Amino acid sequence: MIDLRSDTVTKPTEAMRKAMLEAEVGDDVYREDPTVNRLEELAAEILGKEAALFVTSGTQGNQIAVLTYTRPGDEVILEAESHIFYYEAGAVSALAGVQTRTLSGPKGQMPIEAIREAIRGNDIHLPRTAMIGLENTHNRAGGAVLPLHYMKQVYQLAQAHQIPVHLDGARLWNAAVALGVDVKAITQYTDTVQVCLSKGLSAPVGSILAGPKPWIEEARKWRKRLGGGMRQAGVIAAPGIIALTDMMNRLADDHRRAKALATGLAQIKGLNVDPDSVETNIVMVDVSPWGVSAQHVLALLKERHHIFGNAFGPFLIRLMTHRHISDQDIEKTVDAFLQISRNVK
């Protein structure tokens, strides 16, 4: 089986499994789990923030950020296809009681002037703009990386209006590798950041929320309110430490393979694939010229070739490389699409 659905399907390494078995543990709600404490301290240092909080998922981390920054009736500015808006089950309204102001932008980049115009003034009729959210890399934009100069512009605009910037950095590690920079070069333009340990870094579970120490203390209370207080959590924090120390450099292999996959698929008649748009580990494949749906193509890939992908629209397929995808898997996937192209009508 070749599973290109997501980098969330990665399994923990043997070193991670051993670390889980041997992890020193305690009650994390009492802040007595030494492994969790080490993970949070390490993450804060790597991300260039004062403090960090271990949370169960990227969605929980993002929602804790919204809850900590806002009060009911506020508004948050988000890109129209961002994960917080698109894939978190309406949680900003259901949990925080805030509304979203969504702005569309190429490659996940909301235009600076559009953000400026969206910031609410001091008017009794208007909600308070309580947060600006960015996503880097941007999932629905095909793993696009937000450039540093863009993030700096957003951050400076937000600071001028005293509005915090929260970064959904679920795949921030991929962005840093693609840009060839330390992650601090990115997070310097954010007030808070959420990063996942369980995607390309291969930890089995967990994310990190990082920011100013007083803010993290408030976030910790929101984590408790959401049922995210954990007890002997060192067994899941231990692989997170390995994820942060040992797994980032190998992401370049995922990017190389994604580019190779896109290049191969672009040679197949009837497929719309742009290799130049592949910046990290996500490849978008438009099958509309074939006159069949993405779901139909995915079914053929699964049934005939044991290859799995994700539908991202009626005719759009997302394929994602990760640690378990080899060069041979890329070749087999390109060949599978080629075989399907000869029979599809």
Image (cartoon, rainbow, N blue to C red):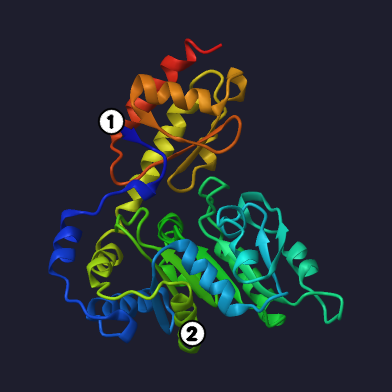
Point out the image quarter for the N terminus: top left
Query: Is 281 placed left or right of 101 in the picture?
Result: left
Q: Identify residue for label 1.
A: 328
Whether residue 189 is visible: no
Tag 1: amino acid: Gln
The residue closer to the viewer here, 31 or 173, is 31
Taking the spot 29% from the left edge, 46% from the top edge, the residue there is 323
Work out whether residue 345 can be spotted: yes
Q: Is residue 340 above or below residue 40?
A: above
Q: Amino acid at mark 2?
A: Pro
Crowd around label 2: few <14 · some 14–19 · many ≥20 (10 Å): some
User: Which residue position holds label 2?
Assistant: 212
The secondary element bearing badge 1 is classed as helix
Residue plotted at (33% across, 74% down): 230
Q: In the rendered view, would you say 249 is above or below 267?
A: below
* Residue 15 relative to residue 274: left or right: left
Q: In the picture, residue 148 is in which quadrant?
A: bottom right
Q: CA distance from mark 1 to mark 2?
A: 45 Å
Quadrant housing residue 146: bottom right
State the quadrant of the C terminus: top right
Q: In the image, 104: left or right of 219?
A: right
What kind of element bears circle 2? loop
- Work out which residue is located at the far bottom of the displayed protein and give it: 214
| Mark earlier in primary sequence (1, 2) | 2
The residue lying at 45 percent from left, 31 percent from top is 263
Q: Position of residue 42 (x, y in %)?
A: 31, 76
Residue 87 location in percent, x, y? Answer: 56, 53
Percent x, y of residue 205? 33, 60
Residue at x 43% of width, y 35% of height: 309
Q: Quadrant of residue 22?
A: bottom left
How crowded is the residue under tag 1: few (<14 C-alpha within 10 Å), some, or many (20+)?
A: few
Return the x and y of residue 335 as percentages of the image width and height: 37, 21
